[in-house]
Amino acid sequence: MKTAGAKPQRCAIYTRKSTEHNLDLAFNSLDAQREACEAYIKSQAHEGWRLVAGRFDDGGLSGASLERPALQGLLEQVQSRKIDIIVVYKVDRLTRSLADFAKLVELFDAFDVSFVSVTQSFNTTSSMGRLTLNVLLSFAQFEREVIGERVRDKIAASKRKGIWVGGPIPLGYQSVGKKLEIVPEEAELVKKIFADYLRLGSIGELAAALDREGVRPRPRKLASGKMIAAARFMVGPLAHLLKNRFYIGEIAYRGETHKGEHEPILDRELFDAVQARLAEGAVKRKLTRSRSSAMLVGLLFDDRGNPMSPSHANKKGVRYRYYVSHALLQNRKSRAGTVSRVSAPDVEQLICDAVRKALNVNDGACDRDLIRARIDRIIIQSDQIAVAFHGPELEANLSDSERALNRLTELTIPFVPRLAPRKGIVHAPLDRGTIDSETRETLLKTIARSRGWMEAVLSGKTASFDAIAADEGLAERHVRRLAVLTFLSPKVIQAIADGAAPSGLTVSSLTQALPHAWADQERMLGLG
């Protein structure tokens, strides 16, 4: 008699490493994990286990979250019923969170997928196996939390002693032997910035003056070794610099200040004078906002977190009001949201009408008072306006309309952004933000490069991605990651070539979450 062969079991290997350290080696931790898992699958060949094509490797990503490109790709394969068994080296490679693990097990059960750890014998189909895994993951999560607490406690203790514990080095200092020393030329620039602010009285004017004088921020060195530098001093970084107590020899931590062991650059008199001027300016801005005809000032933001400030244009004696993203006002067009300029009267009326309708408010209350008393934040998006309200308050002394608003936490308003012409006046066009020429060129070169690699493999000119990586001095993982760009939708490629692709699109964002279907790719980029 012939015995029936075991039912084929499609196996996928998942590997993860928390840091990018040594990932560029020819044989790294991910490769070691995969090799052990492959050997285990071969040992179960008599049970019908077979390794599926494709790699699911997450390098340099923490197990505290499920937002990992390779893991998400693996879960898509699970939901498509293309995998029967998931094999990992250790259970904490999959996740270190007990809550996340419970979600994964529920998903695996729904699609009849088993989970196997090479170094720990577990079977998630049994109640005892689940209990053992939960206990193990509880300890893994406990270990992660204890490590985090220990690191935070060490940082707090060091800062209380005035010790610099790393991070961005303030302008005017340099790190020598893990201690900060003053750089004389930069220290003079810091003193100049503080003195100029006292003379000008405005951070915006200070930024403009430094730009006219050709004063540029200090270049920064990234962990990769690459040097970057801002084109000019921006208002935000200048405001942070002017408030930094580090320059008078103090270290701030969680609302407390401690005497630092580093040498101060500024006299306390100059620093205190600047703080008084900053406080005075904050009061003036608050008064100006309260008197402004723009009722949404301080509440309105684009969908990339930039505040939207009131602006206007005059034409033949008529004033047209707008809200404009700070990214545009500060010449950072690529950082603006999908809607960077809107008509002020239109969006104000739309929000007021929607809030009144949602609350059934007909008591004639002032729109400005209603908006500013209750709304916490408003975010303009390409197809809607998201309104978030303040947290619940005690209702004893509130009117009926205020009680209704008090129970409302958020509101979504359909929105079609447009700036229509009025009386022959052509308003500034809506700026949705598209990629700049440098990003466009980088994307096109990378896509062409990935296509060349794929053609070489398919034609037999190159044996594998390993050979390509060796020839070009790259990590194989990097080559495989870029190779997916070969399968970009023609419509997406055309949009990139025309410069019509959305701003913020990069090689990294494309390769990390690229859907397989062309229609899904186009929809993801707003081209569908």
Image (tube, rainbow, N blue to C red):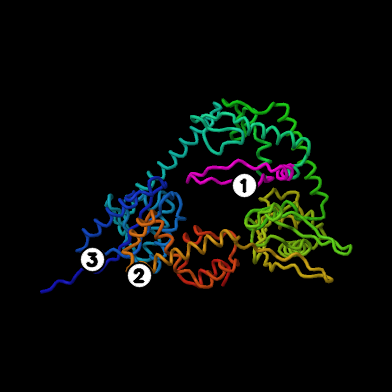
Q: Quadrant of the C terminus?
A: bottom right
Q: Residue 31, image x and y in percent?
A: 32, 52
Q: Quadrant of the N terminus?
A: bottom left
Q: Is residue 454 at least partly visible in the picture? A: yes
Residue 83 relative to residue 444: left or right: left
In terms of image quadrants, where is residue 526?
A: bottom right
Q: Residues within 10 Å of mark 2 (few under 14, many from 20)?
A: few
Q: Amino acid at mark 3?
A: Gly
Q: Is residue 51 above or below residue 299?
A: below
User: Sequence-wise, which precedes: disc 3 or disc 2?
Assistant: 3
Query: Which span of residues is magenta-colored?
Result: 206-235
Provide the secondary structure element on which disc 2 rests.
helix
Q: Is residue 183 above or below residue 282?
A: above
Q: What residue sits 69% from the left and 43% below the top?
A: 214
Report the disc number at residue 108: none
Provide the secondary structure element on which disc 1 rests.
loop
Q: What residue sits 25% from the left and 68% below the top?
A: 8
Marks 3 and 2, how far apart at CA: 30 Å
State the residue lying farthest toward the bottom: 1
Report the disc number at residue 458: 2
Report the disc number at residue 230: 1
Residue 487 relative to residue 440: left or right: left
User: Sequence-wise, which precedes: disc 1 or disc 3?
Assistant: 3
Q: What residue sits 65% from the left and 43% below the top?
A: 216
Q: Is residue 196 above or below residue 40?
A: above
Q: Amino acid at mark 2?
A: Leu
Say which of 7 and 397 sits in front. 7
Q: Tell me the residue that label 3 is attached to.
A: 48
Residue 290 relative to residue 508: left or right: right
Q: Is residue 19 above or below residue 261?
A: below
Q: Residue 352, image x and y in percent?
A: 76, 61
Say which of 298 and 448 sits in front. 448
